[in-house]
Image (cartoon, helix red, strand yellow):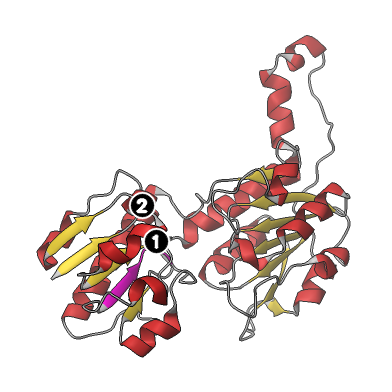
Amino acid sequence: MLIVMLDASTLGDDIDFSALNSFGDVKIYEKTAPCDVAERIENADIVIVNKVKMNSEVLCSAEKLKLICITATGYDNVDIKYCAERGIKVANTPSYSSFCVAQITVAIACYLMTHLGEYRDFVHSGSYSESGIANRLTPIYHEFYGKTWGIIGYGSIGKVVANVALALGCDIIATKTAPVTVVRCVDIKTLAKESDIISTHCPLTSETENLINKDIFDIMKKGAIVINMARGGVWNENDAASALLSGKIGGLGCDVYSSEPFDKSHPFSKILGMENVCLTPHMAWGALEARKRCFDIVVSNIRAFLDGNEKNVVN
C-alpha cells in the first residue's frame, strides 16, 4: 500500500502526519508542480491532495489508484466524473473549518464596517497624540444592528456566520438550493437588492460559477459590503473590482481567488491598498485546530475505506 501526499505544505509545517504510517508506505511532498503529478502518483494506491489538479491527464497512468482524499471541503480541483468512471473513490473533509471561516468572515466584515484599519493607523502613526483631541469619529462608521446580512450558501459555514450576525443585531436572508424554514430564503437578485452585507459560502459548481456578476452588482445597495469566502470563480473578479472602484459597493473582502496566488495582471491588483478593501491569502480555513481536524478526518476516511466502508465519499 502506497500513500502519496502531493502538497503537504498547504496544511502547514506544524501538523504531524505520522498516523499515515500505520496504513503502509507513505511518500510526502511539500508541493508538486503540475508536470510532476502523473509521475508521483503512478504507483499510488491512495493520494492525498489539497489544491493540485487531479484530471484525466494526470490520473490516466495511475492504474493502482483507489482513493483520493482531499484535505478540503470543496473538490472542484478533481475530475469527479472521470474518477467515477475509473472506480476511484473521492473523499472530502466536510465541516472541519466552519468555525474559523465564519470567524474570518465576520472579522473582515467588522474591519470594513468600522474602518478599523484607518482608526488604528491614526493612533499608531502618532496623529492621535498630536491632535490634542480625545476622540476621532471620522471616517463615519455604522452599527450592524438593524442591517440585513445576505448569506449566499446557507450550509455549515453560512449557518455559523448567521448566528454571529444575529447576535450583532442583523436580519438574515439567504440563498439555499433546498430552502429551509429557519431563515428567509430568497433568490440571488432579491438578496442583492436587500442586503447591506453579503458573504458567499457556496461550493463552486456550474450553477454558481460567475454567480455574482455586473448584473448582480448593479442592483446591490450603494455602499454594500461584499465578501467572498467561497471560491474565486463564484464571482466575476473584474466586475467586483469595477463595482468597488466606481463606488457602487462600499467595501470588498476576499480570501479566495481564481488564480492563487494572483499576479499583477489580476483585477484585484488595481484595488490593493485601498482602505475599503480587505484581501487575505486563502487563510480563513486554516486555524491550527481546523487543520488538525482536517487531517484527522482524512485518516478516518482512509481507515473506513480500507475497512470496506465509504466515509465522506462524494462520487
Inspect the magenta stretch and tell me whether residue 129 lies in it.
no
State the residue in front, 17 or 82.
82
State the residue in front, 190 or 243.
243
Looking at marks 1 and 2 on the same chain, the residue that comes earlier in the sequence is marked by 2
The prevailing secondary structure element of the residues shown in magenta is strand
| Image quadrant in which you'd find residue 114 | top right
Residue type, numbered disc 2: Leu
Q: Determine the residue positioned at 19% across, 57% down.
A: 27
Contact, mark 1 vs mark 2 (Cβ under 8 Å): yes
Label 2 sits on a secondary structure element that is helix
Q: Is residue 313 left or right of residue 254?
A: left
Q: Position of residue 173 (x, y in %)?
A: 72, 72
| Image quadrant in which you'd find residue 311 | bottom left
Callout 2: 10 Å neighbours few (<14), some, many (20+)?
many
Q: Depth-wise, is mark 1 or mark 2 nearer the camera?
A: 1
Q: Position of residue 224 (x, y in %)?
A: 81, 56
Q: Which residue is mark 1?
A: 50
Label 1 sits on a secondary structure element that is loop
Quadrant of the snapshot with the N terminus:
bottom left
Range covered by the magenta-colored residues: 67-72
Q: Which residue is mark 2?
A: 11
Cα separation between marks 1 and 2:
8 Å
Q: Position of residue 25 (x, y in %)?
A: 12, 62
State the residue in front, 257 or 169.
257
Q: Determine the residue positioned at 34% across, 74% down.
A: 59
| Image quadrant in which you'd find residue 178 | bottom right
Exactly how many numbered labels are in the figure? 2
